[in-house]
Image (cartoon, coloured by chain):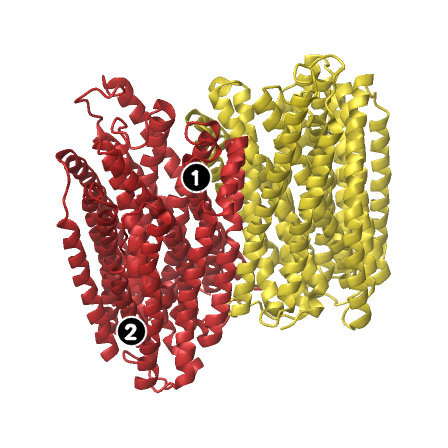
Chain colours: A red, B yellow
Amino acid sequence: MEGLILAIVAGAVALVFAVYLAMRVLSADEGTDRMKEIGAAIQEGANAFLKREYTVLAGFVVIVFIVLLVLGLVRDEQDEMTAVAYLVGAISSALAGFAGMRIAVKSNMRTAAAARTGLNRALRVAFSSGGVMGITVVGIGLLGAVILWIVFEDPNIVAGFSFGASSIALFARVGGGIYTKAADVGGDLAGKVEAGIPEDDPRNAAVIADNVGDNVGDVAGMGADLFESYVGSIIASLALAATGAAFLGGPEVVGRDSSLAVLPFVIAAVGIAASIIGTFLVRTGETTSIGSLLWSLRRGIFAAGILALIGSFAAVYWVMEAQGGFGMENVWRLWGAVAVGLGAGVIIGVSTEYYTSYEYKPTKGIAARSVTGPATVIISGFATGMLSTAIPLIVIAVAVIGAYGLAEYYGIAIAAVGMLSTLGITLATDAYGPVADNAGAIAEQAHLDPEVRERTDALDSLGNTTAATGKGFAIGSAVLTSLALMAAYAKIVGLEAIDLLEVSTLVGLLIGALMPFIFSALTMEAVGRAAQDMVEEVRRQFNEIPGLREGKEGVRAEYARCVDISTKGALREMIIPGLLAVIVPIVVGVIPFLGKEAVGGLLIGAIAAGALLAITMANSGGAWDNAKKYIEAGAHGGKGTDEHAAAVVGDTVGDPFKDTSGPSLNILIKLMSIVAVVFGTVFAG
Amino acid sequence: MEGLILAIVAGAVALVFAVYLAMRVLSADEGTDRMKEIGAAIQEGANAFLKREYTVLAGFVVIVFIVLLVLGLVRDEQDEMTAVAYLVGAISSALAGFAGMRIAVKSNMRTAAAARTGLNRALRVAFSSGGVMGITVVGIGLLGAVILWIVFEDPNIVAGFSFGASSIALFARVGGGIYTKAADVGGDLAGKVEAGIPEDDPRNAAVIADNVGDNVGDVAGMGADLFESYVGSIIASLALAATGAAFLGGPEVVGRDSSLAVLPFVIAAVGIAASIIGTFLVRTGETTSIGSLLWSLRRGIFAAGILALIGSFAAVYWVMEAQGGFGMENVWRLWGAVAVGLGAGVIIGVSTEYYTSYEYKPTKGIAARSVTGPATVIISGFATGMLSTAIPLIVIAVAVIGAYGLAEYYGIAIAAVGMLSTLGITLATDAYGPVADNAGAIAEQAHLDPEVRERTDALDSLGNTTAATGKGFAIGSAVLTSLALMAAYAKIVGLEAIDLLEVSTLVGLLIGALMPFIFSALTMEAVGRAAQDMVEEVRRQFNEIPGLREGKEGVRAEYARCVDISTKGALREMIIPGLLAVIVPIVVGVIPFLGKEAVGGLLIGAIAAGALLAITMANSGGAWDNAKKYIEAGAHGGKGTDEHAAAVVGDTVGDPFKDTSGPSLNILIKLMSIVAVVFGTVFAG
């Protein structure tokens, strides 16, 4: 019980710390009246979107809740409390997303204001805002999981928590992703490309929608995504604890206080402490060099990683040996699994940076292709994205072999817990990016000193790199978590093998591999459609509002209409892909020809194809974006040249790749896995 | 024995018929001196490339031959005659490709010449040329397989034949694909885009290389690809005959004359007869409407399909019931499998046409996105390509379930044989496209009457549709063949199950799914690099040869230098991806941690991801191409507008998608499967 109490304490401390960070952010200067006005518009748009989104989702959540309740009541194998856990998970995920987003929109203007006095202060404000998101996510996630575990003592019920979280996460990622890219792509096409006005120019009616999008997509969406991974990895460990005990040969006390069930909670608690300490190390001097800024963030992440690595040895020793009597060999084995996870996360991050930062050859190569026009930029960027899958996939393969060798599937789940243990700080560095981005936009719109924009641009560039790294990390952890959940599924439904020579498994696998392709196609088309509406609205305003195009004093674009277009587009377009993810595993499971083996194949097919496609899309998108930035920094003639125009095409193609379709795939594979776990008992075959 | 003799007769008849068709082509008028001159240049370039390519491949083939020979001599499980079969396969595939290509280059100018007098004559010449390729491929394929079967009576030895064929096929597809797209993309960028001269303009130094490329890539490459599928499906049936006998419960006479071994040969023989009859039905009146031209080709294909369906019932009845005594139920079962294969091929073809022809909504939608520039064209085209995977994958899944239900894995192999039975004519409609394309290029370069170009353009448009359909068909048959080979592999190495809960299988699957991504990345980058060299050479000639740009009388571009660049680029760039396909399955198989289960996972991962990526790339490429053609036909402002320029970007991106990377994936998955079959006995685990 001590371990579980420790986890509760850690979760509570995290929430207190998040409040502290939030207060620090809110106490900062809000800037000029114009800045406050812009900030208020962004805030209003973001609140309006999240409220409408959550209203739509509430309907979905209630339906699933009833289905789970009825299933629980009529079937012995299913517990009706799963429905309750589902509800708690959905609400927790929504809360975490909402809190992070709310503080993010309040930090935009404060970061811009701080940037007037110096880079370090701006970094602190933006990073603290990201920290609120990161620490809130791990705090709520750990608290929710541990309390449900203490109350119900049943991994199948706690899985409902993860299912609730991932339902919200999927819609948040997809809806937020469509929202942000419809505004971004549509605004750029109508403003930058057609009307020839700069990015973030207040004459562009889509500019506020674009700012809102950064918050609802990149902050709330990303937070919900990783909340789900975090919770999923813990739950997979719980579900697999029994198999781990059999393999490790220790005392087979299954139940609330068994060492193998307590271990993931304690590792997570250690990770929270490490993350909090890490956040204090993020600061910089008066520099604008990206290298030194990056180093200031890295110092925090690396310190947290090392602390987590050391601390988790103590944790494993305490839980397994001191309390559980599993013996030192098993301590080494499980600590090894944690280390495998942490190490894999680092390598995937470094590889992502190599493929997407313009410091290195691949992105420079894409920029060089701009000389022969947009087509060669696209070909080269897409090829780079595909090639960039090799290292992460091989690292994941090696990690899977290693963690499995150490403690079978339980080892894989613990590796995922290890990889995600420092999520508090890694997510903070992620969520800080959109805040810096928006700060720049506010500086532009409020006509602040160019020096301010320079500082926020430096923070923003860095944000692009951390965002790319974060995406690699998100997909890596999603794969490990999903594989562990898949193993938990097999155990729950009593599958001894998932045999590919069985034609039903084979067909399941083909359908599973198909899912990410269909899902990406739908989300990309959704962005295209919504962006088209946006282009037409911006054009209309330029034509119909006298003086807008010329920037006449006192003439304002009707920002709210564009916010509305993005909102409606996102809500309309998120439904079908979202439902697909929930329904397909169930349909495959209950069709007599297919059944539970087919669901096993389905999951693996979706995991493999989803991981590859997600990495390809995230990295080509990131590389295109930075190839453009490389040219803007002066390479190949700089801004205004044909080369730059070619790179802008690449960047625009990359927008839905990296911010809508790619990241949504993480949740797709996790959601499909957790659906299989929760509905497993009703499957045929 | 009668069935096998029938197959020999059918193969021989096919070759005689191919000679007849070739003579018909060669007897046609060659046109003016200028046309002959251009034709000779294309011919020379194509011969030079194939000779150099085959020289490089000879080295590879000899090495593999020695490896197989040594393995056969030192290991009891492996027969040294596999090495001989390998050699025969490699030579046969090269021969078939060479024959088709040779006649294709001779038909270019003859088609152009015939187009001077009318559309029907031009169609007959071009289609006859395609027919030589199609009928030669099935003739040599069937003869080779049946003779080796009669001589060795061992499916493992005959598998060497398929391995030989697929080694050549892979390099032919990859090398040819790089060759043709380097010339096409490079030539377009330097000519159409930079210098502003029309396509196929003789001032463009890359024009002959482009024409050569159509022949070595689309004719020889496609021929080698389908040769391999054709042979592979027959060999998979042979390898699975024993399991089929066990399932169907008939007399278990295993050996040369067992009904289940003879059946695929007889179905193939029936298909050859049906294809030959079908070719006589391809003719048209004096129309230039694509609809009526398409119908004239379809009449041939559909007639052949119906004849094959009816004839194969007779064949199955004769082999299984009259000779084998398997009973009527089993006759229906196996005929059902043939019908499943033929039906699946038709649906995949129709679906491909829907997604890539500008008669339908998807391609029209891509064209409509040109209004907002190249980026939205790319996004929409890529999304369309991904979405277009759904129907083929589901059809394949249903076909797999159906064929397996009828006769287990043997049923899947027979479905593949059925799908490919009318290859003689379907390949003819494919291989005719590049001939018509080149005829147009010759008409342009020889300054023939514009009416001639109009006629060849009509033939060419049609060729784009048949080429897209052919690609769908190629991937569908590749998947069925590969799955059957995978089952044969499992049987050969004695795998009772390929269990995804085994971590080695799982890791194998991840690596397998990774392969198509890496392979596509490498081939796309290869095209990019070679195209860049081409652009620089064309530019150099414009700058250094006085009067070239202005088109001064008597000034000729140095075509041979561009031919040389494509040749060198293709040979240099085909090596690494080619070796990867052969080496990875062997490495995974012999690594102790992985071993033979992992190879099973590897194959399935590669098949699933490969099929999805291949369909995505082929269909987005086809749709971009036709979206451009739709605009050129007058939509959205027509040629010369920004919309057209945006569509050209899509088309250029699509070039390597649809003609290099996409189609190469078919062979990748077949080659990996056959490597596993041939080297299976040396695998660990």
Is A483 located above or below residue A668 in the figure? below
Are the numbered discs 2 and 1 placed on the same chain, yes or no? Answer: yes
Assign a secondary structure to mark 2: helix
On the image, the x and y values in percent for residue B51 come to 81, 41
Q: Amino acid at mark 2?
A: Val
Residue A609 in the image, given as x and y percentages of width and height: 49, 53
- With respect to residue B601, does A466 lie above or below? above
Q: Position of residue A248 (x, y in %)?
A: 43, 82
**Front-lying residue, A113 or A242:** A113
The residue type indicated by label 1 comes to: Tyr
Q: How many marks?
A: 2
Q: Earlier in the sequence, mark 2 or mark 1?
A: 2
Frontmost of labels 2 and 1 is 1
Query: Within 10 Å of the Cα at label 1, are there few (<14), some (14-19), or many (20+) other Cα atoms?
Result: many
- Quarter of the N terminus of chain B within the rendering: bottom right
Q: Chain of mark 1?
A: A
Q: Residue beneath label 2, please?
A: A266
Q: Is residue A590 visible?
A: no
* Residue annotated with mark 1: A630
Query: A322 or B261, which lies in front?
Result: A322
Instruction: Determine the secondary structure under disc 1.
Output: helix
Q: Could you tell whether A95 is left or right of B636 in the image?
A: left
